[in-house]
Image (cartoon, rainbow, N blue to C red):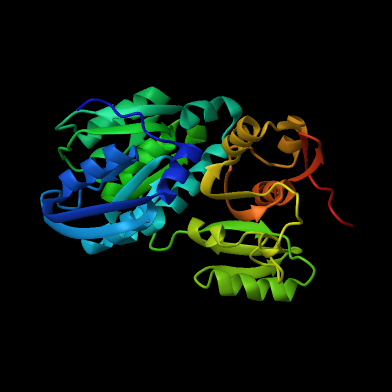
């Protein structure tokens, strides 16, 4: 089949919000996914453990594409998870952990030296042919990043896969999309020279810290209400949350507020904006805002590095009919950043710590 110009980043996010209608009656699963994927220009990858030849019956009318995918996957006891610009469809336990596994891999990569980090972060499109062997796919990836694989024959049994065409992905996400289909994930060893293929833990969590706000106990109670499956506690003057990426996505600065800013009616005559994003790299968000709103972002890279803040970290936000300042706060505060707005210039700064 001819290649597709897959949607990525903000374009993909918008497409997942678009209403679509589908109807299949005893239709082969792989054909249904391929048709939906190509018509919507949204890359989808079906896990090896899901029977692609099973006949599916499903209908949805004018529902957001993301909702349709979730409901469709549930109809054959599967789950959906987004990694980069790929929608993974596979066993529910794997789908529920995948985004967090990707975030944990990103953390491991960020801890490598600058010289060792480069190959792991390399972004590239990926295609493989019909009857591709996953061991060979991993071998090709290892050669690309100049790393050795540990116990690949034990971790990845012989298998043959259907063809695939995927949009640009970071190296660790490409590797992860192969490994999770064998219940394995990434463990970086020897300063980035070796990749171990380890079993996925029964519980997968990532820890992040959040400001306590004016009342730490009230904020803590709100967080526990918003993300009941996560572990939340006040630690070292901040609220520490251990949970899946999906849990953290619920904990926006607005969510912990008694009077969420995106529910406050804007004053007449002020331009307002609506934007919903899930796990999009912050630098991509800034690029899109710069291009579409004519904003100029200025920041001190050394200051951000000293504060341990990376512009490629993923952020989630939901803003509805709010002024530009509220939109910028929603994008930057989860990353630990503040800003000063002068006309069309946005100076991004690291907020000073209170004594």
| 132 to 60, vertically: above or below | above
Which one is nearer the viewer's eye here, 324 or 10?
324
Image point 73% across, 57% down: which residue?
A: 266
Q: Is residue 178 something that shows in the picture?
A: no
In the visual, does 119 lie left or right of 153? Answer: right
Which one is nearer the viewer's eye here, 318 or 80?
318
| 27 to 219, vertically: above or below | above
Which quarter of the picture shows residue 318?
bottom right
Percent x, y of residue 59:
22, 59
Which quarter of the picture shows residue 70?
bottom left
Image point 42% across, 63% down: which residue?
A: 203
In the visual, does 284 lie left or right of 203? Answer: right
Quarter of the rendering occupied by the N terminus: top left
Percent x, y of residue 239:
68, 65
Q: Is residue 315 something that shows in the picture?
A: yes
Percent x, y of residue 152:
28, 39
Which one is nearer the viewer's eye here, 272 or 269?
269
Q: Residue furthest right?
A: 355
Q: Residue furthest front?
A: 269
């Amino acid at each position: 089949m001819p290649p597709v110009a897959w949607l990525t980043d903000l374009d993909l996010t918008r497409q997942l919000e678009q209403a679509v209608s589908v109807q299949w009656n005893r239709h082969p699963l792989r054909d249904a996914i391929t048709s939906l994927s190509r018509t919507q220009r949204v890359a989808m990858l079906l896990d090896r453990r899901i029977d692609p030849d099973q006949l599916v019956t499903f209908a949805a009318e004018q529902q957001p594409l993301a909702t349709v995918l979730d409901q469709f996957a549930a109809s054959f006891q599967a789950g959906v998870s987004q990694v980069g610009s790929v929608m993974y469809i596979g066993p529910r336990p794997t789908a529920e952990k995948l985004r967090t596994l990707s975030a944990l891999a990103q953390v491991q990569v960020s801890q490598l030296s600058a010289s060792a980090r480069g190959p792991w972060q390399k972004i590239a499109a990926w295609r493989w042919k019909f009857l591709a062997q996953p061991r060979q796919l991993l071998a090709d990836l290892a050669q690309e990043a100049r790393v050795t694989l540990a116990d690949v024959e034990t971790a990845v049994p012989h298998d043959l896969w259907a063809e695939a065409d995927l949009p640009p992905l970071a190296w660790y996400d490409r590797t992860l999309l192969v490994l999770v289909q064998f219940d394995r994930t990434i463990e970086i060893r020897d300063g980035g020279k070796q990749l171990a293929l380890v079993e996925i833990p029964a519980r997968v969590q990532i820890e992040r810290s959040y400001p306590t706000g004016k009342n730490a106990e009230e904020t803590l109670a709100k967080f526990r209400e918003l993300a009941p499956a996560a572990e939340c506690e006040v630690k070292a003057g901040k609220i520490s949350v251990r949970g899946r990426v999906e849990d953290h996505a619920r904990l926006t600065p607005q969510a912990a507020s008694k009077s969420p800013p995106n529910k406050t009616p804007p004053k007449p005559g002020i331009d307002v904006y609506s934007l919903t994003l899930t796990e999009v790299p912050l630098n991509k968000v800034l690029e899109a805002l710069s291009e579409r709103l004519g904003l100029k972002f200025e920041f001190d890279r050394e200051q951000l590095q000293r504060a341990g803040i990376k512009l490629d970290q993923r952020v989630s936000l939901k803003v509805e009919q709010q002024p530009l300042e509220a939109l910028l706060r929603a994008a930057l505060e989860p990353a630990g950043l503040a800003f000063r707005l002068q006309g069309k210039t946005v100076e991004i700064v690291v907020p000073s710590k209170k004594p």
